[in-house]
Amino acid sequence: MQRPLAMHRRCTGRAPERRGFSLPELLVVIAIIALVVALIVPTISALRARARTMQCLTNQRSITQAAYAYATDNASRFANPRTDSGGTLFVNGQNVPSASQHCWVKAEGANLAPGGQFERPAALEQGVLFPYVGEIKTYVSPDEPTNPYVSTVSTDRTRVRSYSFNACLGSTRPDELPEFDDDFTAPMFGITTPLSRFNTTTIGTIKQPQRMMSTLVEDDSVAYNNQGWLVLPQTSNWIDWPATWRPDAITMTYVDGSTETRALANPDLPQRWETNGHRWQQPADPASGSPAIAIDWKFFRDRLNPGVLPNSTMGFGN
């Protein structure tokens, strides 16, 4: 029998040749990597922004739930939207001094940093809702530019609170400030309207909890967010304005605990607020229909006290 021939590999004494990338191939690889990075980075940024929005909504929902829990423990009475214990109350047809024991934040005296422009953590801790909220960090939005929990700046120069309550929630009158009475009563309805109609101090007095704003993110240009948040109900004047660190994601909660994120219809509003200051009247938007109204003002105004204030499509704000 013949044996099969053995196969022999010829040895040349040289290592196998290794071929590297050519310059055009390297350029293609680099271009692909750059494209992938360009696609991924905005996605990551958007995801982080969405995570901050969700945390902001979670914070406000916790505060709104704390307000409801406080009410159930206090004969259905809500915490007051005021941020100090001063002011007045409308009782039996008269203005009387208010030493409110129900203010949700107590920003007064030693609870304010020197100069009175910034709250200290004690302002939150001494508010009636803190036992129900439980954590100071809950009062701060992750979008807050001066967030003291991610900043090296002393809390005496940072804002420890990013949120405000609707001034019409938990009040015996709109904001409990006599200067706003005329804006809410007779001129609007065409008849004499008793201020008692605006009383929202207890759970049972809320007409539409699913539509009435509870809290929102606020950035007061003067100092800390002082008192409740308000716009005028008839003319489109912004007494306060929402925080616009992200104009496409203004966060808020409703009395029933639901949440919403709002994008401004007018992206230039933040600059106009800063230029014109508080109480500036926003012009009507020509494309808003007939009668023309200020769209962004209308959105927030209609959430102050729905079921009591008439719908602003009646032409208020022109």
Image (cartoon, rainbow, N blue to C red):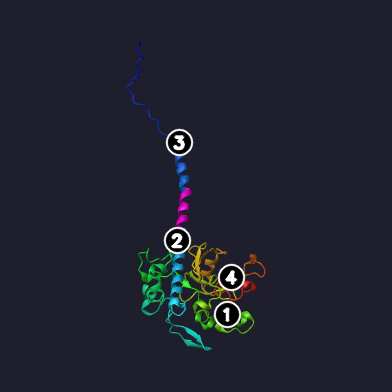
Left or right: residue 193 versus residue 73 is right
User: Where is residue 57 drawn, in percent x and y?
Assistant: 47, 65
Q: Residue at x 44, y 41 (%)?
A: 30
User: Where is residue 44 drawn, in percent x and y?
Assistant: 45, 53
Q: Amino acid at mark 2?
A: Arg
Task: Judge depth for marks 3 and 4 and give the one in front.
Answer: 4
Mark 3 and mark 1 lie on one chain; the one further toward the N terminus is: 3
Tell me how far mark 3 sits from mark 4, CA to CA. 58 Å
Q: Circle 3 is placed at which residue position?
A: 25
User: Where is residue 136 drawn, in percent x and y?
Assistant: 38, 69
Tell me how far mark 3 sits from mark 1, CA to CA. 72 Å
Task: Judge depth for marks 3 and 2 and give the one in front.
Answer: 2
Q: Amino acid at mark 1?
A: Phe
Say few, some or many: other residues with alpha carbon within 10 Å of mark 3 (under 14 / 14 to 19 / 20 or more). Answer: few
Q: Circle 4 is placed at which residue position?
A: 298
> What is the tally of numbered marks visible in this picture?
4
Task: Judge depth for marks 3 and 1 and give the one in front.
Answer: 1
Tell me how far mark 2 sits from mark 4, CA to CA. 26 Å
Nearer to us in this view, 81 or 41: 81
Q: Quadrant of residue 295?
A: bottom right
Q: Amino acid at mark 3?
A: Glu
Q: Circle 2 is placed at which residue position?
A: 52
Tell me how far mark 2 sits from mark 1, CA to CA. 36 Å
Q: Circle 1 is placed at which residue position?
A: 184
Secondary structure beneath dot 4 equals helix
Q: Quadrant of the C terminus?
A: bottom right
Nearer to us in this view, 153 or 232: 232
Which residue is the extreme one toward the right?
Answer: 290
CB atoms of marks 3 and 2 within 8 Å: no
Q: Residue at x 55, y 80 (%)?
A: 198
Secondary structure beneath dot 3 equals helix
Mark 3 and mark 4 lie on one chain; the one further toward the N terminus is: 3
